[in-house]
Image: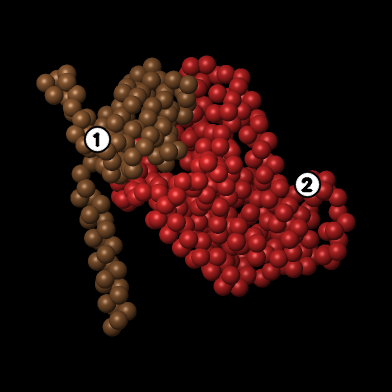
Chain colours: A brown, B red
Amino acid sequence: MTNKRSYQISVALFCAYFSINTAIAATVVTIDLKNHIFEPSVITILRNTKIKLIIINHDDSPEEFDSFDLNREKVIFANSKATLFVGPLPTGSYDFFGEYHPETAIGKVIVTNCETRLVDGSEEVQKC
Amino acid sequence: MLINSLLLFIEETLPIFILYAYICAWHSFFDSSKKSLPLTAKRHKPLSTWIFTLRQDHHFFYLFAIILGLLSSAILTYFRPWLGMTLEGIGYEILLIVISLSLTTGVILGQTTNNDITRKLLFSLSLFLLVIPHASDFIVFFTSVGQTQLRPSVYVGVSIGLGICVSISYLLFFVFLNIDKSLPLKIAIALFLAGQLSNIVTILQQIDVLSSSLPLWNSNNFIADRNEYGQFFHVLVGYDATPTLIYLVVFGAATIIIFTLLMRTKVTENKNTVHGVIG
């Protein structure tokens, strides 16, 4: 009986863990890859935020999005897009690069405590 | 580009070379089809004899599996853009997970059987499965670089990488060959397979099936993930400079389970064989 109860609790915890994980909404960030250069090359996000990174490759050759800091790698084929999830992350700077063109395709994810917002299309306001 | 192609080549091919070394070493301990010679005989054989007498039939199995894997990887590469778009963009990741699980199962079953043919077939299947995604990644890299200009530095990087991988593979094989006990080999294989399985955690986090958590520590200052040592230890013992709790749990559990399976299964150890290098 005890074993059965333990099993039920384990299954419940397991389900709860995945439910909570999928319930956290991810902020969508799109990066364009043109002429082997990431645009934007610097992404600023809030601490402990999960982001859904959509990388669109506009070039005629494939590229591999790679980051040792973020522990992510994904091949994006020519004229197609790829999606991957990053975070939640502690504050800091996380480099990424295109593995096939590391001289030009470089960028970083900066994780801060402050959120930067554009007001009236031009003025930047930081909310910490 | 030289360092980049070198690192990429090592990253993609080192697991294949290491698995090859391990399964050859495994044959040397447990292959009952080999001729039996007194243990003292191996002490007096020169190194060149060891290297040039690797003519057992299992090498034909494995080389055939690798060639078949290379051909299959070309087919996979052709379909990868389509595969990458299926299942809401996670089709290729699902395939990688299935391959990882299958190859690990293949190696474990191969190690726990006493039938030589079954063992060779299972090991061949595992090598075949390991070659497919890694070779496909390298073909994509080669295609990408080739579209701009196929720089000589890429060829140099690949040549150096091949030399490093072959050296490491031979070194590991002869280290285990010269240890009379099979226990270190079992530990090494358990760590290697656990490392391969733990890669699934990263894939699941990347596609948002598993939650990403904060790393428990950062040992990039000691051995960085991005350098040759980091990649070597990642393949060999599942090293990660910034491991998460779930990565460690999966790695630890997989190591213990695989090691226990290898220890509990009664495989006939061929103690009198000169470690399987008799032609």
Label total for image: 2
At 59% from the left edge and 31% from the top edge, which residue is drawn? B6
Residue beneath disc 1: A114
Q: Position of residue B132 (x, y in %)?
A: 50, 42
Q: Residue B236's spot in the image, x, y percent?
A: 58, 50
State how far apart marks 1 and 2 are (Cα).
61 Å
Q: Position of residue B106 (x, y in %)?
A: 52, 57
Is there any visible trace of residue A80 in the rendered image? no
| Residue type beneath disc 1 | Cys
B135, A37: nearer the viewer: A37
- Front-most of B95 and B145? B145
Residue most extreme to the left:
A120
Question: In the current view of this chain or complex, which residue is farthest to the right?
Answer: B44
Of badges 1 and 2, the one in the foreground is: 1
Q: Is residue B149 left or right of residue A47?
A: right
Q: Secondary structure at mark 1?
A: loop
Q: Is B256 rendered above or below residue B125? A: below
State the residue at coordinates (51%, 20%): B146
> Which residue is found at the position 66% from the left and 31% from the top?
B160
Is residue B50 shown above or below A51? Answer: below
The chain containing the residue under callout 2 comes to B
- Chain under label 1? A
Identity of the residue drawn at 30% across and 75% down: A6
Look at the picture and state if A93 lies above or below A35: below
Quarter of the image that includes the N terminus of chain B = top right
Mark 2 element type: helix
Q: Which residue is mark 2?
A: B51
Side of B242 relative to B26 (left or right) = left
Image vertical order of residue A65 relative to residue B39, above or below: above
Q: Does A67 sit left or right of B62 as displayed?
A: left
> Residue B81's quadrant in the figure?
top left
